[in-house]
Image (cartoon, helix red, strand yellow):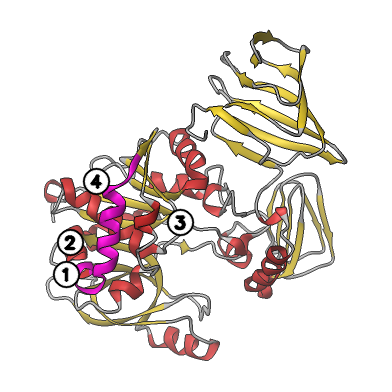
């Protein structure tokens, strides 16, 4: 197929996962796709830039959950990209409803569109091979196939599902019928699959003709299609986001696109590819794809390793020093340290389960919390007192709000602050401060061109983040 006849492909980037197996880095409010785990860019930014060639790809549709909407929007903006839409799922319903929503939206304007579905939290080292596989998948999809990307299995991995390759598709070199999908196997079966050469890892990446996907969804999942149509029909525009209707979307069966369609359609095809792929699902996977030193260690941050081999060592804050250990994962953040054998990386879910039972905040958020206006970092938590370092980006405006249980002292470290306090409006500069009494309406803004850095001291009987009454909010949270 010549470059002139290649169809424009519409990327759909799924960014709804939680990635708990990468705790303590990945957390509910800041999951792995939003983290710079493998480079200076986040996994989401890398995924979006992978399909940023305007001659080949349309602007992407991003599908996110509501909690991450501002972080997703900001990261895409920082990457220099403008998505076609950021669609907000009011609750998680797995990948099939997400694909259905994207297909319905594309069909409204481009019924003959090809849709490339990609998770936002995967790593792909060989971009040229990825682009070649996309071109082959597009050619296959254009002939009436629902295409999945199969990753050439390099080892007997028990953490992935597998795709069994069927006969070659006539007229297309490198594409095959799908003979079957296989759940995550035990070690013995995985070794058999790899030895046979007939199986590939299931990557979770797909290329669909929109019309054919909707046809199969209507046949196999009519209730899902009906729910998604209602969710779009009753959706609300919210700033740069399209917020799906919660009541309607909740009626969509929660299912993966594999279970909902691919295992039951006669149109499934697979394009096997080697492209340096990883789902970055565990710390052992991070070690496998990382750059290793002469001792086989992968390090990130300020790390000293002495007489240590084949380990993944990451320090997000401070110095991490290790001595005389092999085959470990050690990850240190500002509020947690996790140590595990590399071959037990899959079992971090057991730690996560204990954190959930204990309602530990370390599972939910980092001390550094991102907001649409900037960030805050909790420096100290004590009895009736909390200290935060607040950074407001240029033009950032916090909501007009009040608190029932706490007062606040603000000290400007650098930049300029416009402070609304009751009926007053103050302009504060470096080393100036103000006091916000309990129960007084207030607002903080950065009117300057540089970030505003401010120290906030909270005092009172209750200092939880839910003690906020918002009266007006630029970001639609009131």
Write down the residue under mark 2. 139
* Res 56 label: 4
Residue 424: x %, y % from top left = 66, 9
Give the mark toward the camera: 2 or 3: 3
CB atoms of marks 1 and 2 within 8 Å: yes
Q: Is residue 124 visible?
A: no
Q: Quadrant of residue 49?
A: top left
- Tell me the residue at 26%/46% (across/down): 57
Q: Are marks 2 and 3 in contact (CB under 8 Å)?
A: no
Real-space CA distance between mark 4 and mark 2, rounded to the nearest whole angstrom:
13 Å
Of residues 328 and 373, the one drawn nearer to the viewer in this rendering? 373
At a point 26% along the width and 79% down the height, the residue shown is 264
> Which of the two labelled residues, at mark 2 and mark 3, occupies the earlier sequence position?
3
Is 96 above or below relative to 474?
Answer: below
**Pointer 1: residues within 10 angstroms few (<14), some, or many (20+)?**
few
Q: Is residue 35 left or right of residue 109?
A: right
Choose between 274 and 236: the one closer to the eye: 236
Q: Earlier in the sequence, mark 1 or mark 2?
A: 2
Q: Tell me the CA gap for discs 2 and 3.
A: 34 Å
In the picture of the structure, the residue carrying the numbered disc 3 is 91
Residue that carries the numbered disc 1 in the rendered image: 172
């Amino acid at each position: 197929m010549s470059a002139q006849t290649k169809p424009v492909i519409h990327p759909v980037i799924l960014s709804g996962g939680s990635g708990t197996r990468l705790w303590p880095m990945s957390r509910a409010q800041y999951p792995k796709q939003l983290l710079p785990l493998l480079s200076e860019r986040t996994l989401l930014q890398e995924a979006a830039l992978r399909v940023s060639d305007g001659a080949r790809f349309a602007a992407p549709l991003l599908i996110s959950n509501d909690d991450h909407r501002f972080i997703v929007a900001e990261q895409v903006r920082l990457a220099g990209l403008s998505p076609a839409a950021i669609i907000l799922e009011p609750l998680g319903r797995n990948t099939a409803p997400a694909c259905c929503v994207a297909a319905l939206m594309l069909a409204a304007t481009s019924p003959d569109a090809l849709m490339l579905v990609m998770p936002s939290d995967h790593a792909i080292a060989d971009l040229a091979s990825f682009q070649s596989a996309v071109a082959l998948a597009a050619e296959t999809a254009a002939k009436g196939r629902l295409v999945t990307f199969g990753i050439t299995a390099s080892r007997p991995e028990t953490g992935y599902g597998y795709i069994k390759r069927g006969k070659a598709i006539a007229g297309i070199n490198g594409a095959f019928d799908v003979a079957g999908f296989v759940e995550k196997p035990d070690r013995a079966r995985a070794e058999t699959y790899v030895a046979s050469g007939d199986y590939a890892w299931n990557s979770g990446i797909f290329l669909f003709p929109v019309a054919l996907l909707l046809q199969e969804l209507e046949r196999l999942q009519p209730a899902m299609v009906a729910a998604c149509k209602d969710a779009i029909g009753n959706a609300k525009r919210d700033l740069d986001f399209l917020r799906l209707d919660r009541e309607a979307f909740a009626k969509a069966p929660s299912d993966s696109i594999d279970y909902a369609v691919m295992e039951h359609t006669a149109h499934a095809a697979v394009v096997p590819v080697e492209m340096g792929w990883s789902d970055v699902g565990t710390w052992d996977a991070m070690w496998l794809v990382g750059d290793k030193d002469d001792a086989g260690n992968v390090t990130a941050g300020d790390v000293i390793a002495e007489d240590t081999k084949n380990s993944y060592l990451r320090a997000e804050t401070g110095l991490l020093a290790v001595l005389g250990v092999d085959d470990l994962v050690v990850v240190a953040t500002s509020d947690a340290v996790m140590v595990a054998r590399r071959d037990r990386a899959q079992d971090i879910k057991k730690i996560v389960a204990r954190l959930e039972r204990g309602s530990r905040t370390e599972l939910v958020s980092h001390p550094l919390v991102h907001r649409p206006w900037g960030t805050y970092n909790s420096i100290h938590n004590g009895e009736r007192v909390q200290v935060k370092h607040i950074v407001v980006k240029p033009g950032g405006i916090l909501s007009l709000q009040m608190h029932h249980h706490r007062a606040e002292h603000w000290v400007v470290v650098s930049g300029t602050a416009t402070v609304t306090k009751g009926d007053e409006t103050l302009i504060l500069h470096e080393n100036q401060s103000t006091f916000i009494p309990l129960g007084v309406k207030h607002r903080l803004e950065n009117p300057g061109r540089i970030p505003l850095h401010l120290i906030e001291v909270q005092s009172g009987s209750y200092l939880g983040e839910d003690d906020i009454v918002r009266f007006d909010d630029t970001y639609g949270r009131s």
